[in-house]
Amino acid sequence: MATLKDRLVDPAGWSDLVMGNWAVARAMIDSGTRVVTSYPGSPTPEIASALELVPEEKRSYRFDFAANEKVALEVAAGAALNGHPAAVFFKSVGLNVAADSLIQLPLLHLAGGLVVILGDDPGANSSQNEQDNRVFARMAYLPMFEPATPQEAYDLYREAAALARKLAMPVLLRLTTHVCHARELVTVQPCASAPPDWTPRFDPTTHGPYVPITRSVFPMKRRALERLESVREVAESAGCNRVLAPNGAAPVAGKRLGIVSSALPAMAALEVLHDGGQPVEILKLGLSHPLPRKKIAEFLASHDEVLVLEELDRVMETEIKSLAWDSGSKAVLRARTDREELMGELGPQRVRALLARTWPEAFSPGPPTAAPAGEPDAVPRLPQMCPGCGHRSAFHAVKAALEKDSITVADIGCHTLGFQAPYEIGQVLLCMGHGVSTASGLSIGNPARKVVAFIGDSTLMHAGLPGILDAAAHDRDIVLVVLDNGTTAMTGHQKRLGSGEDGGAKVPLKPLFEALGVKFLRECDAYAQAQLTAHVKEAMAHPGFAVVVARHPCMLKLTRDQKRKNPAYQTRPVAIDQGRCDQRHTCVAEFGCPSFVRGADGSVTVHPDLCIGDGSCLQTCPVEAIVRPQRPGGAS
């Protein structure tokens, strides 16, 4: 049986059960995409995982991780300027980092075409907000495709790539979490067998100017608007913009009812109609910007009431209401009315309730969802750092050094979880790399309370360096704790530039910080808790900018790598010497490793399936009740 790895480069067409991200990766190969770049971020990392599975000698494309999303976009755009079909992908808030360049790209002639894949996250499953990037499509004059299933993710990437190349422009492909991670029987087309064409085609004389300054901005913007309008004509006839009528079309309580929707909400509505049998039509938009105005006007004209069904912001609702006014439509337009309906994903249950509130004569809210018989309700569980995580050891040590009124600033990464009990470190969080700059601002006019910021090594390379340069140049009175685990751990251990993981040069932090002007610098292993506590105390006493690096490899990655190298590798969980344990519960209440289990009688045991035997906890017990088990033969 062929593996998915084999499927990716199988030149023949095939059908298989694959996730949406894998379908996109195959679509890239099918459509002749030559350059792909990314900065990892959920829900899109599996696109990279799939592309990296293909051996170098079998790749028809070049795939690179970049330092951040802006760099990733600019590398892909440069390739497209040179005539190479290109793509870039990152998560929703990554577009904020890349926006400065994205806004300029529609003004240019990108000979190879560029597909910008956005992993939006309604429901904030793995993000700090629910940013709706459909707004960016309007602001930047960019077409946007919105697949609803893995099959559509495959099909619409191919359409987006073809359109981008035909019009020599960027095209957005907006995925959402459940489209990325859903699995479906996907049918793919045969791959092109011709060798990759790497002929350079950068030609500013014919296709320029490429410099949007006052003299050329208006002609370039005019071209961008003209190209967008030509896409509107495509949208009118696009097969992905179609009317679905699972139960036919007939009046309900004397009214012809319709829904305009896209992506996952459209599929949720379709499921509700399948269950209920109501003869309501859905105009499902796969190419959602620019809107197909004629097709929507015709849909409005053939219905008495139309519900605009979308997740998050009132994007389509606003445009369709304007269109209805301009066209003199007599249809009653319905939309979400409650603030709560502007948040979260729209699955079948929420859509059913919304339809019941909109058209109670046609829809009932349905019974409340209950847990299946015989299954207990799931116990709420907070996200937490893995057993053996160096960040846990670091936070335990740093907390011992903090003053009672210290201000702590978090950043994006696994270490963000430090804001939870028992550490309660990290009182402010904005975005990647903000920590040191925000801490600098908090320190101004604040001589009484020391500000301590935290940043991971990946985030430091992504967006932290400018803030460190500022803090060093102004000698801000703050402490920066760098939590270095040597990889991009939070999103799945993707290679971090500067770590040496990708075969490139390893960038040592000490000379980097010294070159940026950092004068106070201390380093130690995050497991060396007493030393780390002393370093942080010394840093807090230093008047000015101080940096402490707490370094330890990601233990989840380390243990997985060990098991790959040696299938016989086994961990040695620690144990509790019940004769010594006086039930102070420092291990549970202050160190907080999830491997420790506190019983109803107060006793503490170690969960053998969770403990990896790293031993970082041994130094935390005041009575030394945490012990290593003996090896066979009696050695400890």
Image: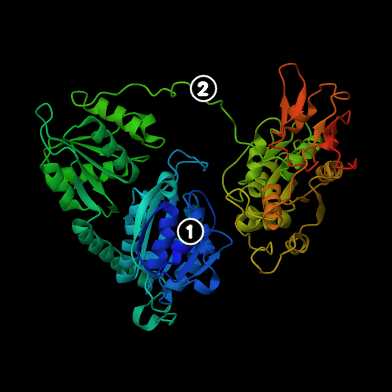
Q: Quadrant of the C terminus?
A: top right
| Vertical arrangement, residue 21 with respect to residue 389, above or below | below
In the image, is 16 to the left or to the right of 529?
left
Q: Residue at the location (44% across, 54% down)? A: 21
Q: Residues within 10 Å of mark 1 (few under 14, many from 20)?
A: few
Residue 64 in the image: x percent, y percent?
A: 54, 66
Q: Residue at the location (76% across, 33% down)? A: 591
Q: Residue at the location (76% across, 27% down)? A: 605
Can residue 199 be seen here? The reply is yes
> What kind of residue is marked 1?
Thr
Q: Label 2: which residue?
A: 376
In the image, is 456 to the left or to the right of 72?
right
| Quarter of the figure with residue 304 | top left
Q: Secondary structure at mark 1?
A: loop
> What kind of residue is marked 2?
Pro
Can residue 140 be seen here? The reply is no
Q: Residue at the location (75% across, 64% down)? A: 515
Using the image, tell me which numbered label, if any, was put on residue 3: 1
| Viewer-nearest residue: 545 or 87 | 87
Q: Residues within 10 Å of mark 2 (few under 14, many from 20)?
A: few
Q: Secondary structure at mark 2?
A: loop
Q: Do callouts 2 and 1 mark residues in contact (Cβ within 8 Å)?
A: no
In the image, is 495 to the left or to the right of 270?
right
Residue 628 in the image: x percent, y percent?
A: 84, 38
| Vertical arrangement, residue 35 with respect to residue 432, above or below | below
Residue 579 in the image: x percent, y percent?
A: 88, 23
Q: Find the distance from the CA under tag 2 to the CA under tag 1.
A: 37 Å
Q: Nearer the observer, disc 2 or disc 1?
A: 1
| Viewer-nearest residue: 470 or 350 | 350
